[in-house]
Amino acid sequence: AQPIFAQRGQEGLLLDKMMVKRAARFPRRLREPLNLGVVGTFAVGWLLPRLPRFERAHPGVDLRLSTHNNRVDLAGEGLDGAIRFGGGAWHGTRAVRVLEAPLAPVCAPALARRLRTRADVAAQVLLRSYRADEWPRWFAAAGVPAPSPLRGPVFDTSLAMAQAALQGVGVALLPVRLFESELRAERLVQPFATSVSLGAYWLTSLQSRPPSPALLAFSEWLQAEVAGERA
């Protein structure tokens, strides 16, 4: 079996068997608080629909969620852990990879009907995040020259960007795995399969503080949920 928090260079920490056994003996009769910060896109698009299963599996954990836009201060906010998007290297933290989330263009159905080829995307309003390299990387993967300069508003959350796409403002580059309900309902459309992977979602916690039994229980459940979806 893989360790709960996998070793990742000098920034990672391999939990010993004693800590894993401690999590397994987590007392269900007690309600231990678990203060967790979660990037909003992951919270709405993946975690919230699955929370009833966590509650049934771990009634002894008093889960307290707060959302953020990928900027989080674990110590300053009094958090036991945080789920965030990136490459997995944050100073002073241990990190376990949770979910891959490639980015692909999505837009409203009416706009999608105007997109015949990938090159047509370059002529649209491009909804952007604060990570400036995302659209250029996607155009490179699509084999299409990126427009210069990029034209379109910048958002601090993917949730706000998705709402703009729903309203027909432009084409958004989003982690489609977290917008499956909108895609299934055809409120959003993914016109092209080309995607680009620029990071993943990670569960992080402070290296200076041993993870609590509640955090270990949540980590085990989280990884089991993701593994079950891949099976």
Image (cartoon, grey):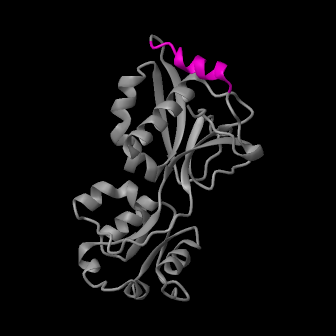
Q: Nearer the viewer, residue 1 or 158?
A: 1
211 left or right, relative to 116: right
Give the residue drawn at x 30%, y 86%.
Answer: 116
161 left or right, relative to 52: right
Give the residue drawn at x 69%, y 45%.
Answer: 8
Please report the bounds of the magenta region as a residue range: 16-28
Q: Nearer the viewer, residue 165 or 101?
A: 101
Give the residue drawn at x 58%, y 68%.
Answer: 131
Q: Quadrant of the C terminus?
A: top left
Q: Is residue 172 above or below residue 40?
A: below
Overall secondary structure of the magenta section: helix
The spot of residue 191 in percent (x, y) is 32, 74
Give the residue drawn at x 45%, y 35%.
Answer: 224
The spot of residue 168 in percent (x, y) is 30, 75
Does the segment drawn in magenta span residue 21? yes
Q: Quadrant of residue 213?
A: top right
Does the segment drawn in magenta span residue 161? no
The spot of residue 164 in percent (x, y) is 36, 69
